[in-house]
Amino acid sequence: MMSRTMQAGMVVALLAAAGLWIGWADTWEGLRAQSREIRTVRAGFIQEKHLEILQKPLISKGVFYFRAPDDLRWEYTEPIRSILLVHDGKTERYIEGDDGLVRDAGGGLPAMQMMLGEISGWLKGRFEENPDFNASLEPGRKIVLTPKAAALADIIQRIVLQLSDAPGLLDSVTVHESDASYTLFRFQNAVLNADLDDAVFSRVE
Amino acid sequence: MRRFFAAAFLVVPLVLAAGCAPLPRLDPAPPGRAAALSRSCDALFPEGKWRFIHTVRATLRGDRQSVMTGVTVIDSDARSIHGVMMTVEGLVVLDAVYADGRMTLNRGVPPFDSKSFARGMMADIRLIFFKPDGPPEAVGIDARGRPACRYDNGPDRTVFIAVDPETGNWTLRQYRGRRLARTLDARAGDPSTAGAGAPVPERLTLTAHGFPRSYTLNMTLLEGERIPGDTE
């Protein structure tokens, strides 16, 4: 069974990816309707890790690609290159080392694919349908996801998606682990519905 | 991943595969140089409060690797540690504090949620960043001609440190009895980080030779900064 660490890690990455293209709608059905028009997304992201013992946030940067229904490439370029690939029902992670990109042993991959089945609903804009989270659509173009189970709440307190002014885009995703620890993903330079080749989701180079 | 890290770090009944070996040879220091050699060993360890951020690559059995980000705040005077380990996506999997000889686990996400794992991590951090207790019991020149120091580091523990005078790189070996338990190779960093001591290492490689499992941690420095004290 996939570890909760990997589940939560995937939640972070995939939620952030899913959230980017949530359209500016004020109902769940509206979000789903707009998400059906999205075939692909490519965007850069800046990740800020805030911790009590850090004087300033730890910054990571990268780019991600999504192709409906379930293909994903979530790639960090700084401070260390790493790539998470989700393609054809398989999930792999690679980390750059002295000898180039090396497959990360922390994948727990077969079980991770089960988790992807659970969260694929998010990638279709169906946040309120995920059994692990309560979802609320709040004023100010904000979606708040709160774990239902105490075990998951021990890992992630809540997730806040901030919708952009422009339909189809999202400004940020914030994953709160505790009052003092959270991760903020800011998205930029998003391109919707460009053609993305299979290689983007299957090759690491 | 769970089994990987559990095998790498968790304290389990000791199975010793490593062979015994004699402690490294240490020829007496040249006349009048003992104090300087002792100081050069002591200077390798950060003094005061520091914050370090590393990329930590854990390797078990050859090529199985996993990478985390580690944030460590140490206070050499209080010999306290606040250590946080997180995934590259920023998810904190371990947050623990070591102070006054006691360890407190603030947060642990499986498989990093056991106190024994956190204690093992703290022991490794102490070995990496804290100067061994007391002055060296012997200083001199090792078999490769490097300045070296040997410390009595607690019951049945011996630490041996050798410094390459040309590169500033240094090696630490910890023995338990006559068994080699840990090897730490430090690559000297930017001289501007030296302060009153040696430069902060840009790369640290810690190898655990059993006790309870063999693993290697390759730590690449992302940030290292001195934290001003209350009186500074």
Image: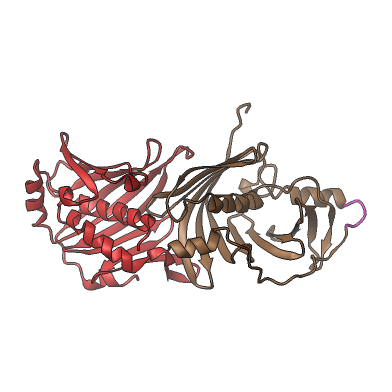
Q: Is residue A44 magenta?
A: no
Q: Which residues are magenta?
A: B29-33
Where is residue A141? Give x, y as percent: 16, 38
Where is residue B217? Give x, y as percent: 56, 61
Residue at figure coordinates x 31%, y 57% from the top left = A10
Say which chain is brown.
Answer: B
Say which chain is red.
Answer: A
Q: Is residue A197 left or right of residue B8?
A: left
**What is the count of numbered marks?**
0
Does the rendering let one see residue A163? no
Q: Main secondary structure of the magenta part?
A: loop
Rendered-image quadrant of the C terminus of chain A: bottom left
Residue at figure coordinates x 58%, y 53% from the top left = B120
Where is residue A183? Give x, y as percent: 35, 44
Quarter of the rendering containing residue A106: bottom left
What is the image's colouring?
Answer: by chain
Residue at figure coordinates x 67%, y 47% from the top left = B130
Looking at the image, which residue sits at the far front? B13
Q: Is residue B97 left or right of residue B46?
A: left
Rendered-image quadrant of the N terminus of chain A: bottom left
Q: Is residue B32 magenta?
A: yes
Does the rendering let one see residue A59? yes
Where is residue A4? Give x, y as percent: 36, 55
Q: Is residue B195 above or below residue B89?
A: above
Q: Is residue A148 left or right of residue A155?
A: left
Quarter of the rendering containing residue B171: bottom right
